Image (spheres, rainbow, N blue to C red):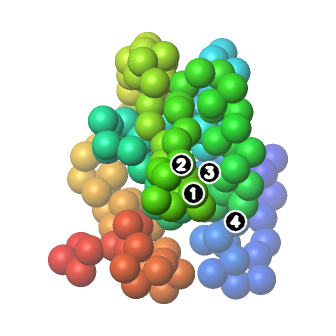
Amino acid sequence: MTTSGRRLRFDSLQQEAFLNLWRTYDRLRCEEDALFEQYQLTAQQYNALRLLRAKHPEPVATLALQSRLVSRAPDITRMIDRLEERGWIARQRPPENRRLVLLNLTPAGIALLDSLAEPVRACSERQLGHLTAKQLKELVRLLELARDPYEEEDGPWKPSRES
């Protein structure tokens, strides 16, 4: 890797890999941020809405949603508050367990996701469309391999064993 003809130096191959991963995430995230900014939405909020849609019309418990998010959401309650304020989700507490919070998409949330479908697809194409299907599959495999020791054993992001 060079910058203005100079080679970047790393303390180890692991550091070089990690910093390249971080840099790649930062570059790709810029495309995503520009898209979601138009909707006054964060990528994390979009991810939550997308996960709720996958279960719709069934409600999803807050903790179940939190465990499926792409990145950690330390303040899931605040994120849910914002989505509810915008009218994109509804929150309910079952009478038999008032500590449980169930979430569901509203018609406005579904409409938002419908309007985002094509722009999100186009964003993904801009981010990684220059790679072949074979390269993308290998990238996914390597990322899963790198992440595997840090995933919860029964978590939704744990790579399958046949990968």
Label 4 or label 3, whichever comes before in sequence order: 4
For image coordinates 60% across by 71% down, the residue present is 17
On screen, 156 above or below 51?
A: below
Q: Distance between the Cα atoms at labels 2 and 4?
A: 43 Å
Asked if the residues shown at circle 4 and circle 3 are in contact, with their CB atoms under 8 angstroms apart, the answer is: no
Q: Which residue is mark 4?
A: 19
Please say whether residue 23 is visible from this viewpoint. Answer: no
Dot 4, how many residues are within 10 Å of its Cα: few (below 14), some (14-19), or many (20+)? few
Q: Distance between the Cα atoms at labels 3 and 2?
A: 37 Å
Front residue of this view, candidates 17 and 112: 112
Could you tell me which secondary element the residue under label 3 belongs to? helix
Asked if the residues shown at circle 1 and circle 2 are in contact, with their CB atoms under 8 angstroms apart, the answer is: yes
Label 1 or label 4, whichever comes before in sequence order: 4
Label 2 or label 4, whichever comes before in sequence order: 4
- Disc number for residue 25: 3
- Disc number for residue 154: none
Q: Which residue is mark 2?
A: 93
Q: Amino acid at mark 1?
A: Arg
Front residue of this view, candidates 34 and 56: 56
